Image: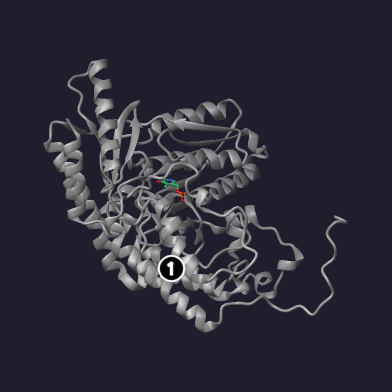
Amino acid sequence: MDPSVPDPPEMLTSPPPHMTPDEFRQHGRAVIDWIADYWERVESLPVASTVAPGDIRAMLPDAAPEEAEPFEHLLADLDRVVLPGVTHWQHPGWFAYFPANNSPPSVLADTVSAGLGLIGLLWSASPAMTEIESHVLDWLVDLLSLPGHWKTTSTGGGVLQGSASDATHVALVAARHRASARSGLPATQMVAYTSAQAHSSVEKGANIAGFGVVRLIETDEHRAMRPDALRAAIEADAAAGLVPAFVGSTVGTTGTTAVDPVRAICAIAREHELWHHVDAAYAGTAMICPEFRRHQDGIELVDSYVFNPHKWMMVNFDCSAFYLAEREALTEALSIEPPYLRNAQSDAGNVIDYRNWQVPLGRRFRALKLWWVLRSYGAAALRQMVRHHVAMARELAQRLDDDPRFEIVAPHPFSLVCFRCSPADESQTSQEAADRATDAVAAEVNDSGVAYLTPSKLDGHSIIRVAIGQSRTDREHLDRLWKTISEAAV
Ligand SMILES: *Cc1c(COP(=O)(O)O)cnc(C)c1O
């Protein structure tokens, strides 16, 4: 106890002063108007923020206010303080990283979710949260033609996580649990495999889950995992007394959207009793169109799968859909039953308690925005969006292909195109000149303010990634991007 701080005086306490319902209606309308205005004018703003480190903090007072400020001041500071420090992910000239495309119904649903203010720790903490989540994820199984046994009405089930990284982490935990039951050996003896092109979340998740070894398997000329190299690594590890326990394959890698051979990896995983997890964080949304499903041939044989509706399905962050073929394999690894969470429905096994499918206890009502997006657009419009983006990616690729100044550096099965400035020949000097030219094009496009893309490296050389997937992007934006690229290149 700090003796210099006296006890609060004895008095009759009361709740703090809130906005009245009418004030909330008034300010709420102003906020929705602000967002609608933002969406209308976002295209006129430079895509990337140009503030220097510390610029935003310098506009903030040193201490939190002791007395209430009028709401108008808060709203005004969105324009004064926040917007200068915003890089506009919802700009139609957004071609960087992968998209995080949102949509009006998704934003409205998230607002409702905040208004309800629920924490769905268990089914009984708000039954609608769990049941809508299970049901809508079962819908997606049919819409994306995922295996039927992944439905919650069968042996599997879907759950919304905050990120693909979270999903991959808990898949690794389930794999560890299964391998430890089988081998009796500790996690430090276990090996997780993934390709050298896989997302860093696999390695990170394996480290958190305590795996002793992570092996990055080499890839082929299309940057897909080589099954023969995977098999050789597993056999060498098993011979050395280690426990091969997990393999993570990727459908649509972050670097170039390379696609691992899922069916061939499944055969190896089954033979050696590895948990097989598929990361389709970006490309998963494309499976709503039948023509892309061949890229995940063999999917009915995997143990778990994740994709992010918050990347390409117009559901705003965060919303990551994680599926299991056998839900018990995960819940056995994660269930802990303290007395304060016991209740009749859970004890009777009549309900799903999603707390046993994830690391946190508390969870948001994320399913609402997914449900509203699916209902507001309908599957047909989502297919239309995916095909529009993929068509524009092919058009851009065609322009790059037709122009001798550029070369495409990787297949583009979805809507990401990776290219570089062509070197004059194979010599070291020409390669270095091409790297410098590529970096210069990326910098010029990003400085232009009309488009934003990601400079990256592939095999040690500079490349440019153009990810087409913002919900408002259309051909005029692609034309503007192409014009900027073309003028920047020598
Ligand atoms: C974006 C991406 C991730 C990471 O997603 P988070 O939801 O941010 O964790 C993982 N894997 C792949 C292939 C990705 O493209």
Q: Is residue 157 above or below residue 200?
A: below
Q: Residue at x 85, y 63 (%)?
A: 6
In this view, the residue in front, 83 or 459, is 83
Which image quadrant is residue 331 in?
A: bottom right
- Local secondary structure at mark 1: helix
Where residue 200 appears, as percent x and y from the top left, is 47, 39
Q: Is residue 212 above or below residue 413?
A: above
Q: Residue at x 62, y 39 (%)?
A: 210
Q: Is residue 247 at all visible to an observer of this figure?
A: no
Which image quadrant is residue 455 in?
A: top left
| Residue denoted by label 1 | 369
Judge left or right: residue 303 versus residue 354: left
Where residue 438 appears, as percent x and y from the top left, is 26, 31
In this view, the residue in front, 318 or 374, is 318
Where residue 232 appears, as percent x and y from the top left, is 46, 28
In this view, the residue in front, 247 or 25, is 25
Where residue 109 appears, as percent x and y from the top left, is 44, 71
Q: Residue at x 38, y 40 (%)?
A: 264
